[in-house]
Image (cartoon, rainbow, N blue to C red):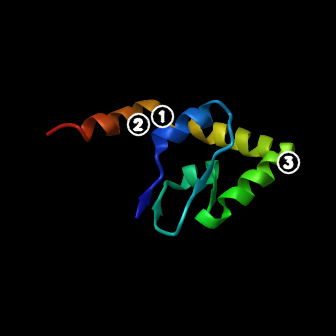
Amino acid sequence: TCLLETGRVSYLLNNRKAVVSEVSPTTEIEADHRAAIVGVPYEGLVDACVALAHDAAKRGDVEQLGYDIFKRRSQADYLRDAISGLAP
């Protein structure tokens, strides 16, 4: 099982950057985050990046969708969950 590192991608989504990530059937990722990124199998990473690099309109759509989805999430909820996980 693999876990999408939300902390790493949140900076990119918040700054309207397209995120391409390896996603497999065993990747743990929330549904809205799955929609916010371009998730592909490992073998498809290069092709997905090249395709976005050559298609400014598609890249812009991915960037805006990722930003919109990220902004809908409550940062207070993220912090609450993180802090509660630290308690003994």
Marks 1 and 2: in contact by CB < 8 Å? yes
Give the number of the disc on residue 86.
none
Q: Residues within 10 Å of mark 1 (few under 14, many from 20)?
A: few
Q: Residue at x 13, y 40 (%)?
A: 88
In the displayed structure, 65 sits above or below 3; it is above
Helix, strand or loop at label 1? It is loop
Marks 3 and 2: in contact by CB < 8 Å? no
Measured as percent of width and height from the top left, residue 31 is found at 54, 56
Q: Residue at x 23, y 37 (%)?
A: 86
Q: Is residue 41 left or right of residue 4?
A: right
Q: Residues within 10 Å of mark 3 (few under 14, many from 20)?
A: few
- Residue farthest along the left direction in this orientation: 88
Q: Residues within 10 Å of mark 2 (few under 14, many from 20)?
A: few
Q: Which residue is mark 3?
A: 55
Q: Which residue is mark 2?
A: 78
Q: Which residue is mark 1?
A: 74
Q: What amino acid type is highlighted by mark number 1? A: Ser
Q: Is residue 81 left or right of residue 42?
A: left
